[in-house]
Image: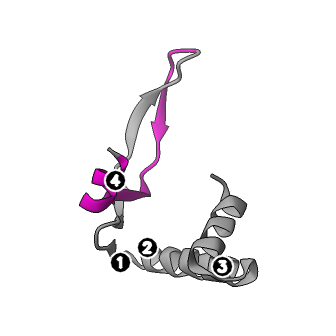
């Protein structure tokens, strides 16, 4: 499912216009991005939680040449599914 399909599904399920559903999705994405950038955790009970964790710098290997390369440290976004979502998928 891509963004346009998600907007269509949100609009039909919630009885909204596609424009309203797009604004709601864009607002959710923007608010989520801002919160994660600050280091906050977002928890949607039953659905799951988004958090940011730090991945340490490490040494990797180029698979073509076998030469060692340095991989820089960075922040990564993590999502852990909630119990309701997990049970509905399985």
Residues at discs 4 and 1 in contact (Cβ within 8 Å): no
Graded by Cα atoms within 10 Å as few (under 14), some (14 to 19) or many (20 or more), the crowding at tag 2 reads: some
Q: Residue at x 69, y 67 (%)?
A: 8
Label 1: how many residues lie within 10 Å, few (<14), some (14-19) or many (20+)? some
**Residue holding disc 3:** 21
**Residue 42 in which image quadrant:** bottom left
Instruction: Answer with left or right where residue 41 lies relative to residue 29.
Output: left
User: How far separated are the C-alphas under marks 3 and 4?
Assistant: 24 Å
Judge by depth and name the residue closer to the eye, 22 or 40: 22
* Distance in Å between CA atoms under marks 3 and 2: 22 Å
Dot 4 or dot 2: first in sequence order is: 2
Circle 1 sits on which residue? 40
**Whole-percent x and y of residue 24?**
61, 82
Q: Earlier in the sequence, mark 3 or mark 4?
A: 3
Q: Say what secondary structure mark 4 lies in.
A: helix
- Label count reads 4
The 10 Å Cα crowd at callout 3, few under 14, some 14 to 19, many 20 or more, is: many
Q: Residue at x 34, y 53 (%)?
A: 88
- Front-most of residues 61 and 52: 52
**Disc on res. 36:** 2
Outermost residue on the right side: it is: 19
Vertical relation: 57 (above or below) 16? above
Q: Which residue is drawn at 32% across and 44% down?
A: 90
Part of the protein shown in magenta: 65-89
Q: Nearer the viewer, residue 85 or 30?
A: 85
Label 4, label 1: how far apart the Cα atoms are: 27 Å
- Spot occupied by residue 66 in the image (x, y as percentages of width and height): 50, 15
Taking the magenta stretch, the answer to whether it contains residue 74 is yes
Q: Element under label 3?
A: helix
Q: For marks 1 and 3, give the one nearer the viewer.
A: 3
Determine which residue is flagged by label 4: 88
First in sequence, mark 3 or 2: give its number. Answer: 3
């Amino acid at each position: 499912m891509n963004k346009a399909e998600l907007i269509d599904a949100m609009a039909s399920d919630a009885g909204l216009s596609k424009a309203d559903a797009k604004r709601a999705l864009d607002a959710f994405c923007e608010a989520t991005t801002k919160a994660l950038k600050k280091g906050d955790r977002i928890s949607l009970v039953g659905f799951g939680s988004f958090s940011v964790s730090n991945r340490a710098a490490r040494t990797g290997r180029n698979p073509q040449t076998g030469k060692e390369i340095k991989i820089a440290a960075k922040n990564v976004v993590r999502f852990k599914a909630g119990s309701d979502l997990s049970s509905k998928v399985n």
